[in-house]
Image (tube, rainbow, N blue to C red):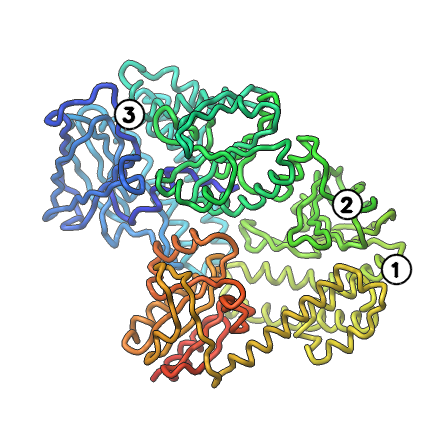
Amino acid sequence: MIKIVKKVVQLLMLCTFGLFVTQSQAASQKPQNHEKEFKIKGKIKGLTNEEGGYALFGDQYPNGYKRVKVNMNKGKLSYKGTTETSTVIKLSFRNKNLSKTTTGGGYIPTNATTLMCVIYPGAKIKVSGKITDFIDAYPSDGGENDILKGLTSKLHPVLNQSVNISLELDKNKKLTAKEVAALKKTQEELGTQAQNIRVEFLKKHASSVAGLWLMEDMLVRSQIKIEEVEEFLKGVDAKKYGELSYHKALEDRVKGYNSTKIGNVLNFKTKATLSGETFDIKDLRGKYVILDFWGTWCGACVKGMPGLMEFRNAHKDKVEVIAVNCGDSDERWRKSKFTTGYNWIHVKSDKGDNNLANKFNVQGYPTKIIVDPNGKIIKRHVGETPGFYEELKELMGLETEAKGEEFTITANIEDINSTEGSYYFQEKGKPKGRWIKFPMQGGTVKYTGKVSEPTIIYINFTDNKVRKYSNPYKAGYFMSNVSLLGFVAIPNKEITAQGKASDYIEAYAIGDRENDLMAKLNKQVHPLLNKVMNNYCTLGDKSLSEEEKKPVGEECNKLNEKISAIKLAFVQENISSIIGLSTARSLLNNQISLEEAPSYFAKIDEKYKNSMYYTQLMDRYKQLIEEKESKEKTAEGKEAPEIVTSESYTGKAFALKSLRGKYVLIDFWGTWCGACIKGMPEMKAFHEKHADKLELLGIAAEKGGNDRWKSMIKNRGFNWHQILNGKDDKDFVKKFGVSAFPTKILVSPEGKILLRYVGEDAEFYNKLEELIN
C-alpha cells in the first residue's frame, strides 16, 4: 500500500524551504483588509540573513499553491502578513545546520527543522530561541501560540533525535550489527515517546487550533484512529473553532467513515464533472460501481489504470468506474491523458463541500470503494495489490478468466505455518499474468485450478520463515524460487508434493515425467541457490565493510557458476520437457551461445513445439539475435544511427545531427531504473565540467505514461536533452541494441560511436575523460 496523501504530495512539490500553510483560508465572517494583518517578530540565535518563505494552498492558485518570501535580516525576524482565519504555519530557512541530507542526495523532512506558529487576524507573535541541528525556537502570544509551544517544545527535540538516527544508519557504514540494532531500538522508543506526547497534548488541548491541526495531521499519517478523533471532537468548542477548515475536515472524515462502512448504502451527487452537469450515483443502480480515488501525482494510481480499464471493459455490462481525481488543479485534471484517455465517469474532489476525499475518509492512494447493484458498499481497498481483480470477480460473482481443464495440487510441507497460498499465473497468448490466492492451514496445500496446457507454477507462502530478507531490518525481501513450492500443473491431473521447510522449501512434486524432471533439477539447484540467496541477504547488511563483503560476493559467483553448469547439463539431456524449455530460455546468450542455440533447438520433440515455453524460448532467441545485429551496427567505430523525434521534454522536434560538432553522451534510462537515477548527479557534474565540448541526451524507456518522466526531469533538474523511446523507427532502444539499463553511448563530434558502456562506475568516467580530451 502506498500511503500518499494530498498534503504530503503538496509539500513535496515545494522547495526544501518555505512557510507551509497547512490550513485552507476559510472563515464564516471574513475580516476587512486592515483587520487581516498578523505580525511575527523575534530573534533566533544562530540565524542571520537566511532566506525563507511560505506557501498558501488553495484552488485559486496555479498548481494549487502560492509562494511568498520571508527572510531573516541581521539575525532578526520581522514579518507582517495577512490571513482571514486561524492557521498553523511552518516557517523554515535555508541553513546548512538544518539540512537532513541522505547519502543519496535526498533529505528527510521533519517539523523539527521548522518554526511553527498559529497565525490569525490581529496576531502579534513573539519568537525566541536558537538553532542547533534543529530549530529550538517557539512562539508566544499569551494564547493559541503558547498552547502550540506546549506541543512543539516537547515534540520537536524527540523528532530531531529520531531523524538523526536515520541519518546515522544511512551514512555510517562502519556500524556493527549490534550497534545498528541498538540504534533501531532507540528509534522505536523515540517513536513511542513522540506518540505519547501527541496523545497527552490532545487530552488537554483538543479544543485549540493546534489540537485540531494535530488531529488532522495524525489522521493523515495513520497515527490516530478515526474513532479516537470522533471522541476528541466531542470536547471541542464548536462555537469557537467550528468554522476552521481543520474542524470541518475532521468532521467530514468522521461522517465519511461512518457513512462509508461496509454494508451502508452510498449516496452522493456532484457537479464537479467534465461537462459541469450533475452526476448522481443512483443513476448507476443495477451495476457494480468502482469508485477509484486517484491523482496524476500518484504513480501507483496511474500505473494501475490500464488494469482497471481491462477489468471494466471485460465486464462493462455489469461494472462501471467513477474516477475521483484528488490533489490536481482543475486544468491538470482536464488535460491529463488519464482523464481524456479513459472513457469512464470522471469527477473532481475539491475543497469545501465537494471534498470527496474527506467525505469518503480516503487516506491512502489509490483507494477503491466497491458498490453493489443495490448501492451498498461491499469493499474498500487501498493500493494496487496482486490478485485484487480476482477477488473482485469472486465478490461480484463474475466468470473467471481461466480457461482449460482442472488440475489439483495436494502438498504437505513440514515445519511451515501459512494462512494463504498464492501464485502468478500466465495463460498462453496473454502478455500479462495475474496473481491467484487461496486459503491454507499450516503446511497443507489443497487447491484446484485450471490450465489449458502443462504450466509451471510456483506457490508463495505467508510464513516469513522461508523469506529471504534483503537487509537485517526485514524491510524487503528477494522473491526466490527457493522460498516457493514449484510444480508443473497438468490438465486433468492430480499432483502431489511433500517435503519440509528449513530456511527454504525442500518440497517437490513427483509422479509424472514433467514433475519428476522438475524435482530432479530443483533438488540439485535449490540447496546451492539457497546459499546464494543467504549471501545476498548478508551483502545487504550495511554494517559490513566492503572488505567483509568481498569473500561473500566471491562465494556467490562460484555458486552461481555451479548452478549454471547444472542447468546446462540438464538442458543438454532434457530440453524436450516443460522445465527444460524454460531453463534453456534463461541460459540463452550466456551458457548457450546464440551460435550454438540452433543445435539445442534441433533436439526439441515436435509435441513440445505447441507449448508456450517453446514460443517464449524462440521469441527470446529472436530478440537476442536482433539485439546482437543492432549492437554490431552500433559498435564502437560505427556511424551512430540517426535519432529524429518530436517526443521530447520540451515538445520540440529533436535530431541527433543538430548536436554535431560536440561529443554526445547518450544515456538510456527509465524512471523505474534505480541504478539509472542514482548515477544522474555524477553524470550531471561531469557534463557541467565539460559543457563546452559535451552534450547529454537522455532516452527514457518508460513502461507507462510520460507524466512521471516529465515530473522527474523537472523536479530533479535533469536539464539536458531528453526524449522518449518510441515504437517502430522511433524504438531507439532496439535500434542501438540496448538490453540493460543504464547503457551509455558516446558519439564523436563527427557522429561516430566511440564508446558503449553498461552500468556506471569510476572506470566509465575515466574512459570518458580520456576520450573527450
Left or right, residue 288 beside residue 723: right
Asked if residue 710 is positioned above or below residue 316 in the image, the reply reads below
Dot placed on the residue nearer the N-terminal end, 2 or 3: 3
Residue pushed farthest right? Answer: 511
Question: SS of the residue at dot 1?
Answer: helix
Q: Position of residue 641 (x, y in %)?
A: 47, 76
Question: SS of the residue at dot 2?
Answer: loop
The residue closer to the viewer here, 682 or 508, is 682
Three-letter amino acid code of the residue under disc 3 = Val
From mark 3 to mark 1, how far is it between C-alphas? 72 Å
Asked if residue 711 is positioned above or below residue 197 in the image, the reply reads below
Q: Residues within 10 Å of mark 3 (few under 14, many from 20)?
A: many
Dot placed on the residue nearer the N-terminal end, 2 or 1: 2
Left or right, residue 205 beside residue 265: left
Q: Position of residue 694 (x, y in %)?
A: 33, 76
Tell me the residue that label 2 is attached to.
403
Going 21% across and 30% down the picture, which residue do you hit? 119
Tell me the residue that label 3 is attached to.
209
Q: Residues within 10 Å of mark 1 (few under 14, many from 20)?
A: few
Dot placed on the residue nearer the N-terminal end, 3 or 1: 3
Tell me the residue that label 1 is attached to.
513
Examine the rendering and report whether any part of residue 292 can be seen: yes
Three-letter amino acid code of the residue under disc 2 = Lys
Of marks 2 and 1, the one in the foreground: 2
Examine the rendering and report whether any part of residue 410 can be seen: no
Left or right, residue 309 beside residue 723: right
Labels in figure, total: 3
Circle on res. 28: none
The residue closer to the viewer here, 696 or 676, is 696
From mark 2 to mark 1, how far is it between C-alphas? 24 Å
